[in-house]
Amino acid sequence: MHELKHGYFEHNGINLHYVEAGSGPLIIFYHGFPLFWFSFHHQMNALKTDYRVVAVDGPGVNLSSKPGDLAHYRLPQLAEQLDHLARHLAGDDRFYLVGHDWGGALAWSYAQHYEQRLHKVVAINAPPTNQLLQLLETNPEQQKRSQYMYSMRSGKTHRLITENNAQRLWHNAYAKFRKLSHYTQQHDDTFRQGLAQPGAIDGGINWYRANIPELGNIGQAHYWPSRNAKTQTPALLIWGEEDDTFVDSFIDDLPHFATHLEVCRLPNIGHTPMLESPDQVTHVLRDFFSR
């Protein structure tokens, strides 16, 4: 009754692959880099008894279209596509949105621009995109941590992470999960298959190419919905405290971008809480959505 089903949704010539299960209020899950829909399979399986759970492959990733034109990866287009997907699935009903990493940044931006469409929004280890751009303008530590956003676009790093169907990236990026008792060989094989889809890694990198300007070249035109856009949607940040991707000082200023904010800190958890501590994340989500 609640088995995972695969589907496709077409918008502006782009086919978006998604996986769904369950019935009830809609939750859309949106992954980050270098992940895809399967990064939320634990939460989907746990919540599908009470919700209609849908996890997306973003453009460029896994089984979704992989356009070469960067316009398809820019935040306004991604948010519009997400809104049309939600309307395709649930009409004009409000829904819950959960995003991790890039998916979290998109979730914040969507909530800032389309807040009337959401019940609640959750970001997992991700600041809003407009806040991140401000950090990249002013914060030397965030600039240092974000060097990978630039180095992987071309040259040696790009070659290393894309060659042999992303073999090296898969081996290194997923090494931390292989030590976990709940991470099985089948999980590892599924992630390997997703990263090995032709063009999938470059498709993921296109999100950075389209939305993260070179340091020193960030201007007002790069901010969407705007530099100081905020949302009044009830919001939750789930924060794995061992994260080394973003400076945690952004959390102090996050209320300027999300005015009805809760923060759940997870000690001894890194950048991917939904995979590192899936039951804990599911419990936090269920509690937040039920209130």
Image: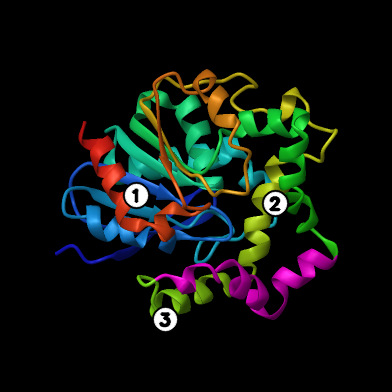
Q: What residue type is labelled 2?
A: Asp
- Colour basis: rainbow
* For discs 2 and 3, the disc positioned in front in the rendered view: 3
Left or right: 218, with 19 as reference point: right
* Camera-nearest residue between 8 and 278: 278
Question: Between marks 3 and 1, how big is the CA–CA gap?
Answer: 22 Å
* Camera-nearest residue between 141 and 12: 141
Report x, y in % for residue 227: 65, 21
Identify the magenta region.
156-180
The residue under label 3 is 185
The local secondary structure at tag 2 comes to loop
In the picture shown, does residue 283 fall above or below 45? Answer: above
Quick one: quadrant of the N terminus? bottom left
Q: Which mark is residue 281?
A: 1
The image quadrant of residue 288 is: top left
Q: Residue 69 carries which label?
A: 2
Report x, y in % for residue 109: 53, 32
Q: Earlier in the sequence, mark 3 or mark 1?
A: 3
Question: Between marks 2 and 3, how big is the CA–CA gap?
Answer: 36 Å
Q: Which of marks 2 and 3 is nearer the N terminus?
A: 2
Question: Between marks 1 and 2, how big is the CA–CA gap?
Answer: 35 Å
Q: Do the residues labelled 2 and 3 touch (CB within 8 Å)?
A: no
Tally the numbered discs: 3
Q: Which amino acid does label 3 sit on?
A: Gln
Q: Is residue 15 magenta?
A: no
In the picture shown, does residue 187 fall above or below 41? Answer: below
Please tell me whether the stretch drawn in magenta is mainly helix, strand or loop: helix
Report x, y in % for residue 281: 34, 49
Q: Which residue is drawn at 55% across and 71% down?
A: 175
In the picture shown, does residue 263 fall above or below 214? Answer: above
Q: Residue 186 carries which label?
A: none
